[in-house]
Structure formats: structure tokens, C-alpha cells
Amino acid sequence: MKTKPARGRVLHYWRREIRPLLLMALVVCSIRSSLADWNDVPTGSMKPTILEGDRVYVNKVAYDLKVPFTTWHLAEWANPECGDIVVFFSPYDGKRLVKRVIGLPGDLIELRNDALILNGKPAEYHSMPEERLLDVAPGDRANHLFAIEHLSGRPHPVAAFPGVPAKRDFGPVRVPDGQYFMMGDNRDDSFDSRYYGPVERGRIVGKATAVVLSFDHQHYWVPRWHRWFEGFGS
């Protein structure tokens, strides 16, 4: 019985098996790099909107189109708006973070005792409905204060953590052109623009719009089924 030479077998295996898999992987990675992705959230800096163990969907074409595997912009058709939740590369250490846009270019940002003042106008705060806190761990509910903050007509939950040292007073600071001021919803437990400054437009990866998957890491990573595919509503 004749057998194919070793070189022939390798070429055959390359054409029939390896090359299609590599092409498929390249396409998938290109889509994740330029169009859509997800981001794991290991900390509670965006609590109660986003919890530890959530995986959020990132729309990478919400604002622009980039060259795959780079931050080079091919086209821009929108800019982040006040209240958007975005994913960006931290100017502090380059890590991908998830925060809320609090200030746009030219805005004046000020914080007094955890209360936000935007362009000289204090934000409005209202009490948080209890049903909005059902997924928050009992310990966190006990040691945090929660409220609904109205920012540029877009309400969203915020939290304060009185028991820890935090930067509860800040500014006023003017956001430079082409940059955005980011803050976590869990104001006293978030490393954000109060510490490393505003974020350049080119560092923004995309807009986070929903929780894709969610697992409760405090209870053996049990799935939080009701949070799966849940959008970030007001």
C-alpha cells in the first residue's frame, strides 16, 4: 500500500483542517476587535447598575469604526453622551475599565459630599426603590446608601459607602476638549477620573449596553438567570 509522503500529508492537513480554523478564528477575533465584544466586571465600582460577576455587552460601533486590533479610527459618527456607560483603556495603567460618562468636553465637574454639580447645577437625587436592590448582597445593602441620580435628564442608580475613606469632594474641574470625565456609580468605591483625570476620546472602546451573562461569585458562581440579557435601563 502506498502512503503519501510526510510533506504531502502536512500540506493536506494544513489545507483541510488548520487553514479553515485559522481563518475562522481571524474573522471572529476581528469582529470582537472592531464590532462587538464583552467585558467581565470583577469589582463593584459600578454597583448597583453592574454587579461583580456580570459580563457586559460592548457595542464597539456605537461611536466609531476602528481598524481591527488597533485604536486607529476609520470613521466617527457619534460621541459619548452624558450618562452613557462606556468601556475604555485607563490612562493610569492601560487596563480596560467600565464607568459612566459624567462630563463631556467643556463641562465643569464638581462633587460636594458625594453630590454631583454639573456646570454649576446640582444634580437631583431621589430614593431608590427596594426592588432595584434585590440582586445586591445583604451586606452591601446594609453598609451602602443608594439613590437615583438625575444626570442631564437621564436617571441612574448611584451608591455611597460611608464606612470607607473616599474622595467625596472634588473640583471644580473643566473637562478638556476631546476628553471625557468618568465615574463609577459606586462613588466611594471607584477608581476613576477623580484620581487619574479625564479620558481621551481615542481610549474609549465602545458603549456597554446590557448584561450578557451574570454569575454570583459569592455563592459558588450560581447563574443569575434573570440578569442575563438585561439592558441598562433607567
Image (cartoon, helix red, strand yellow):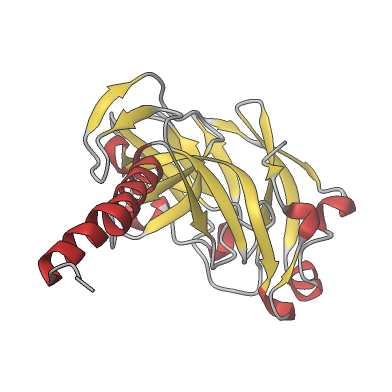
Q: Which of the two residues, 178 or 204, is positioned nearer the viewer here? A: 204
Whether residue 74 can be seen here: yes
What residue appears at the point 45 percent right and 61 percent down from the top-left corner? 191
Which quarter of the image is occupied by the N terminus? bottom left
Q: In the rendered view, does 11 fall on the left or right side of 152?
A: left
Q: Measured along the vertical axis of the image, is residue 139 above or below residue 90?
A: below
Which quarter of the image is occupied by the C terminus? top right
Where is residue 10? Give x, y as percent: 18, 65
What residue appears at the point 23 percent right and 43 percent down from the top-left corner? 70
Where is residue 39? Give x, y as percent: 49, 55
| Farthest residue, direction front | 1
Q: In the rendered view, does 28 fall on the left or right side of 54?
A: left
Q: In the rendered view, does 27 fall on the left or right side of 85?
A: left
Q: In the rendered view, does 182 fall on the left or right side of 145?
A: left
What residue appears at the point 28 percent right and 63 percent down from the top-left corner? 93
Q: Which of the two residues, 34 or 162, is positioned nearer the viewer here? A: 34
Q: Which of the two residues, 230 or 32, is positioned nearer the viewer here? A: 32
Number of numbered markers: 0
| Farthest residue, direction right | 130
Q: Measured along the vertical axis of the image, is residue 142 above or below residue 155?
A: below
Whether residue 174 can be seen here: no
Where is residue 21? Give x, y as percent: 34, 54
| Quarter assignment of residue 133 | bottom right
| Quarter assignment of residue 55 | bottom right
